[in-house]
Amino acid sequence: MGANTVLPVAQCRLPGEKEGDYVWALNMLRLLMIENDIPCPQVIFTDRDLACMNTLDRVFPDTPSMVCRWHMNKNVESMARKHLGQVEVENPAPGQPKMENSCEKNSFMASFFEAVDAETEEEFETKRKDLARKSKPVSDYLDLHWWKCKSRIVKHCTNKYRHLGIRDTSTVEGTHAKIKCKLKTSRGDLNTVFKKLQSWWTISANETKFLMEQNAKIAPQLLQKNRYTRVVRIITRFALKETEALWKDAEKIVNGNIERSMCSGAFRAIHGRPCLHELISIIESNGQRHLVPEDFDKNSWIYRDQEGIAPPRIQEPATLTQNRNNGSKRRRRLRNYGAGGTGREPTLNERIDANHPATPPRSAALPPTDPQVFGTQDEDEVLPFLEPFVPPRFWGYAGQLPFPNRSDNA
């Protein structure tokens, strides 16, 4: 999420990993999101499980999915090591592996990483031919298993998705470790697992809520600058700190008259926040343009349903001036301020801000109420009493007046 943290949503325990199991699990997840008014995900990460990938295309047809690069790299390295071999290490140190990768294997993996990070289709095809020249068996393995789903892997295809720079599933491994520490054992029935994880879900939700409240109330010194006045405490601190790092690079380019590249729009499509070229245009506008919340994706907003208006800053309290008491002892005694008098100085709540220009001098009247806080009293409707006051009835006389009419008794 935009606060650079992991927010657990749901857990599911499946009897198998067939396509029918994934259909039920993902449909339940989609139903949960609809019932709680959760928007559809912008991107979904999986390993190369064909059953899961096919189910995602059916349940979330409008959501792009990506393949975890970490799982892919492990499989490709294993295949390259099998065909390109390893060499024995001479005089290995204690704890050092006795075998290491060969130069051919390292060269092939370097070309593979360049192919995955290709910015254009032409660059990808060039690197793909280079891989076939270095190792035909491993290149055929890539064509058969990985390049078929290159739209989920290759960079020039995934740059269209808002994945926030995340390209593997290792982000959630920390959450898995917390769950395992909470369980403490791999044995037990589902009821035991459910009860043990209830407290973990509560703690996780409270931690996320506390983090969002901190972002909405506390602005660090780094973000207390004029350029962040309109976005601080609306956009998460992590997104603004990342923008600050780009802002420094933009200032170096503007002040040093460094040659600039063309903006491809990939950075905004991936991260959902202003890119280097947008920040340069803001700096060169000389105050005509500013950073506004609309420049950031809703994923970076603290509260997605709030308006794009920054809350007012909490300023230091104004210093209240007090007139110097130059009266004599007799005058103070006559005003009941003497040693035996009962007079007192006005309390803090009874004072008025004499420094404020809207406060009339020596005015003891209370300031007018704020209609936005206390409502508009001018539009209140005055309802007269239509019936005379009737005392409350006594028990046992339901539906009758408690006191008889005096005219009837007379």
Image (cartoon, rainbow, N blue to C red):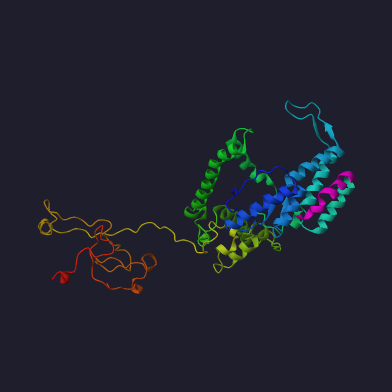
> Which of these two is toward me, 254 or 296?
296
Residue at image point 76% right, 53% down: 54
| Quadrant assignment, res 106 | top right
164 relative position to 403: left or right: right
Residue at image point 28% right, 65% down: 366
Magenta stretch mostly in which secondary structure?
A: helix
Q: Quadrant of the C terminus?
A: bottom left
Q: Give the range drawn in magenta.
A: 135-151
Horizontal and vertical percent position of residue 261:
71, 62
Horizontal and vertical percent position of residue 98:
79, 29
| Quadrant assignment, res 86 | top right
321 relative position to 236: left or right: left
Q: Does the magenta stretch include residue 141?
A: yes
Horizontal and vertical percent position of residue 97:
76, 30
> Which of these two is toward me, 187 or 301?
187
Horizontal and vertical percent position of residue 23:
71, 51
218 relative position to 113: left or right: left
The reply to whether residue 315 is visible in this rendering is: yes
Residue 208 drawn above or below residue 103: below
Residue 379 drawn above or below residue 259: below
Q: Does the magenta stretch include residue 207?
A: no
129 relative position to 210: left or right: right
Tag count: 0
> Which of these two is toward me, 396 or 36?
396
The reply to whether residue 291 is visible in this rendering is: no
Residue at image point 52% right, 43% down: 203
